[in-house]
Image (spheres, grey):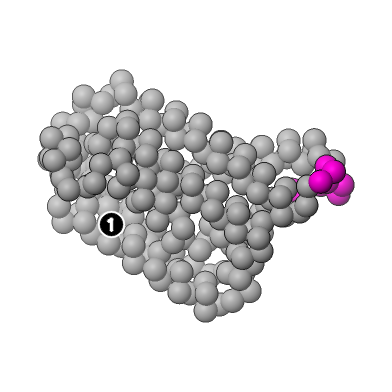
Amino acid sequence: MTVTESLVAFLLAAGLLTITPGLDTALVLRTAAVEGARRAAAAALGINAGCLVWGAAVALGLAALLAASQLAFEILKWCGAGYLGWLGLQLLRRPRSGIERAAASPAGGRLDWFWKGLAGNLLNPKVGVFYVSFLPQFVPHELPLGIAVGGWCFLLAGIHVLLGLAWCSGLILATRPLARALQRPGVVRLLDRLTGCLFLGFGAGLLFARR
C-alpha cells in the first residue's frame, strides 16, 4: 500500500466511523440543543482532544498495554463505565427544565464541558484498543522520509480528529434552526432523560465489553 492509497483508504474508513452514531454524537447533540453551541463546541473539542491523546499513546506504544494487559483494560473499563453511569443518573434524576437553569447551573462554563468530553473519551478503553488495532492497518509499505511508524499513526489520528471536528461542527449547526423548539422545558427534560438512558446504556455496554 502506497502513501496515497493509505491516506485515501483511511479517509474513507475513518469518515464512516466518524458519522456512525455513538456516545460522542449523543453528547454533542444534547449539549448543543440544551446548553448552546459554545458549550457543545467545548465538548467536541474535549472529545477530539481525547482522540489525539489516544493517538499519541499509540505512537508511543503505550496503548498496546491495553491490548496486552487484561488488568489494565479492566481498570480503565470500570472507571469509564462508572463515569458514564454517574452522568446518566444525574441526567435522569435532575433533568433540566430549560436553558435558564442550564446557564445557572454550577457547570463551570465551557471549560467544564471540555473536560466532560475529554474524560468520556479517555475513560473508554475501547477507544485505545480500537486505535492500537485500527491505525497500524493504514501504515504504507514505504513511509515518507523522516517519518517513523509511530509518527505516521499520530498523523492518522490527527486526520481522524479533523474529521471528528468537522462532523461535530455539522451537528451543532444542524441544531441552530431548531434551537428555540429544542429549548422548551418539556423538550429539554425529554432530551436529558433520553441522553441519560443512552449514557447508562453505553456504560453497561462498556462494562460487559471484552478486548
The chief SS type of the magenta part is: loop
Left or right for 24, reference 184: right
Image x and y of residue 88, in percent? 27, 56
Q: Residue furthest bottom?
A: 71
| Membership of 144 in magenta stretch | yes
Residue 1 seen in render: no
Residue nearest the observer in this picture, 197 or 39 = 39
Residue nearest the observer in this picture, 31 or 191 = 31
Left or right for 138, reference 102: right
Residue that appears at 44% across and 47% down: 47
Magenta residues (range): 138-146
Residue that appears at 43% across and 41% down: 45
Pick the quarter of the image with the C terminus. Answer: bottom right
Quarter of the figure with residue 128: bottom right
Tell me which amino acid carries mark 1: Leu
Q: Label 1: which residue?
A: 87
Image x and y of residue 4, in percent? 80, 35
Quarter of the figure with residue 179: top left
Q: Residue furthest top?
A: 177
Residue nearest the observer in this picture, 198 or 70 = 70
Pick the quarter of the image with the N terminus. Answer: top right
